[in-house]
Image: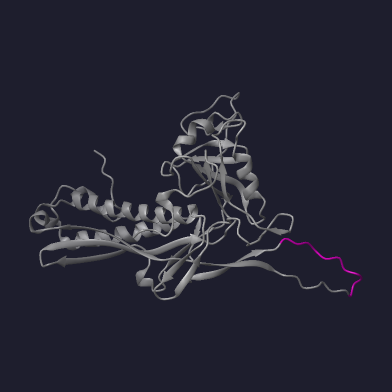
Amino acid sequence: MTIKVAPGFVDLIELAEQRVTEVGWNVISDAVTESARLHTEAMNELLTIVEEPPRVKEKVEIAVQTELQPLEGEFDRPKPVGMLYSYEVGYPIYWGAHAWGVGRESAVKMTVAEANKFTLQGLTADANWMIRHILTAWFTNTKYTFADKEWGDLPIMPLANGDAQEYVLQSGATAADNHYLFQAVGIDNANNPFPVIYEELGEHPENMGDPVVYVATNLKTSIEDLSGFVENTDADIVPGSAVPTLARGPRIPFGDKVLGKVDHCWVVEWKRLPNSYILAHPKDVEPFIGFRQDTAPELRGLMVEQYVDNGVQRINALLRKAGFAVRRRTGALAMLVGAGAYTPPAAYTAVIPQ
């Protein structure tokens, strides 16, 4: 039987059936701490769409499109121009925690395998917490104020949502924009959202590469039925020469399976998405979500607290203090299919219940 192993328990797995009291609680405590450290490293590597700014708010700067100025003679000088286009965004921060524990009897009977399973459950809880907060930042289409206990009220911005803010276009001009889209009918050849997604992201010079589009599972069949859809190849199957095939797919930070490509868009099924929702960002993604952690290094990453409660119950707690918000307002989009207007899903709408 294959056992899924928490990263800090790899060297202990051959002791899986031994009781923790035989191995030593100090060994298990060290394994939990090491699991949290390695899990933090893995999560940081996974989150390619986010950036960790060392501040609670920042001025996001985008290069303005321009070209060289003509000079009149060898002694003429170019005139200074505005270098950057900018706007200010803030970041929320929250505490989250998970714990497992044993009493006087269960502490004696617990095996290394059981301690491993409880630790894995905590690592999964942290990953789910992080993804929920990222999706909430991505889906929420209105500005709100976060009451920070240390820094006061912070403006938390959504993606471009049709407000007065202007953004740089490929032409060099600036204009307001809205990256929360909707399509009133279902997906078919006459109602194909992918050209719109491609154009919406591609109109901004800072967005590079074909879009990666995450789709809810209930949209999968209608997307695969589009006439221009090309299925992604199975790594274990060599297709025939008469069948169109795709090159290696993009490195995706989220999602479950790269389904294929249509109208220059990579299509990725993401079972976590609520029915009828689509999310997208450029393949060569520059972080469009900011990841805030505490300024104190000791309060960053997945933290471990281990203690004996009431003199009887031995507790292993995993804690995180972090938050996410949009930083590049044109760096991604969200879409709702089969509705006359965009509304965020109830499960992923700020302000997040704690």
123 left or right of 182?
Answer: left
Give the camera-side residue of 160 and 1: 160
Q: Quadrant of residue 82?
A: bottom right
Give the camera-side residue of 270 and 261: 270
Q: Is residue 216 above or below residue 332?
A: above
For the question of whether residue 54 can be seen, the reply is no
Q: Is residue 216 above or below residue 224?
A: below
Q: x, y percentage for residue 61?
A: 62, 66
- The residue depicted at 48 percent of the width and 70 percent of the height is 154
Assess whether residue 322 is covered by the magenta stretch. Answer: no
Over which residues does the magenta segment extend? 65-75
- The residue depicted at 50 percent of the width and 48 percent of the height is 343
- The residue depicted at 35 percent of the width and 71 percent of the height is 298
- In the picture, which quadrant includes the N terminus? top left
Please state the total of marks drawn on the protein image. 0
Q: x, y percentage for residue 72?
A: 91, 70
- In the picture, which quadrant includes the C terminus? bottom left
Assess whether residue 69 is covered by the magenta stretch. Answer: yes
66 left or right of 257?
Answer: right
- The residue depicted at 41 percent of the width and 44 percent of the height is 272
Q: x, y percentage for residue 125?
A: 32, 53
Q: Quadrant of residue 3?
A: top left
Q: x, y percentage for residue 166?
A: 65, 61
